[in-house]
Amino acid sequence: MKYFFKSIATYSFWRYALFSGEALAKLLATVGALYLFMEILDFLGIYNKNQYSAYAIFPMIAFAIIYVVVTRRPITRVSYKVPGRDYVVEVRIGDIFAGTNDVVVSTNTTFDTSMANGLIATDSLQGQVATRFFQSNTDEIDKQLQIDLANANGTPRVDAPGKGIEYAIGTVARVKGHGRTFYFVAMSRLNAQGTASTTIREVEDALSSLWAFILTHGELKNLSVPLMGTGRGRTGYPRKKMSERMAQSFADGSKDQVFSNRLSIVIRPEDAENFGVNLYQIRDYLVQGLH
């Protein structure tokens, strides 16, 4: 409920809820329907239109406004088709694995997958991939990762808490299962104690490398990506701003060639609730920033 009330308190919500063309059309249609109902009552002799119509318009407008606001309450999905381009950018609140999209999975530069040693949390995005799609069989995930990592330049790291080979930020490796492709992209580093961290610049570099990899290795499928760096990446960057940066990065990567017709930036419901994410404000950016 916190997410609901915080959204209502913003200018962006009221702009779209009441002061938009669609809302105005719904408002006028509601007033028209109420007036028609009043005419029917007058025809049947139940209501005297000539005696009360001058005053009836006020409660009709008030009712219509309440109806419009109630039917245009805070939303969980916004999308924007960039003019002149064949792709759509979407931001939604929900389960990143819902649907059939290929999924981007943020990982560390050593591509650790083991949940047994505590480096990868079971409730993290990586942990959910392992438990939901591979029955916690991280050996199979490692096997598939190694195919693409064989073509990447890795360097030994003596103080690594897990795997001993480290790859550059932005290195991408694919894992396939249940008819879907998971793009593991290195965007954070583990310290000697196993704690991950990253920077805004590293997230942007990782995204740029990700788009380039999908362009040459992908199959033009729809993509779902998490808000990279806002959780265990510890950037401290606001989630609304991160969604805007990611949308802009995707648009920049698609300037010359389209590699996906739809990008879904997915926000966890608990994050939207705890950090006051407002999709109406994000919709403002998509319309203004990507136009």
Image: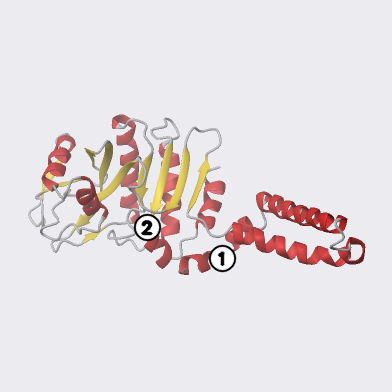
Residue 103 seen by the camera = yes
Q: Could you classify mark 2 by the number of other residues whose Cα lies within 10 Å: few (under 14), some (14-19), or many (20 or more)?
A: some
Left or right side of 13 for 150: left
Q: Which mark is residue 242?
A: none
Where is residue 242? Give x, y as percent.
41, 55
- At label 1, the amino acid type is Ile
Q: Indicate the quadrant where residue 68 lies.
A: bottom right
Q: Nearer the viewer, residue 157 or 77?
A: 77
Element assignment for label 1: helix
- At label 2, the amino acid type is Arg
Q: Earlier in the sequence, mark 2 or mark 1?
A: 1
Q: Which residue is mark 2?
A: 268
Q: Nearer the viewer, residue 144 or 82?
A: 144
- The relative height of residue 69 versus residue 286 in the rendered view (above or below) is below
- The relative height of residue 123 versus residue 180 in the rendered view (above or below) is below
Left or right side of 204 for 65: right
Q: Which residue is mark 1?
A: 8
Which part of the image, by quadrant, shows the C terminus?
top right
Q: Could you classify mark 1 by the number of other residues whose Cα lies within 10 Å: few (under 14), some (14-19), or many (20 or more)?
A: some
Where is residue 70? Give x, y as percent.
61, 61
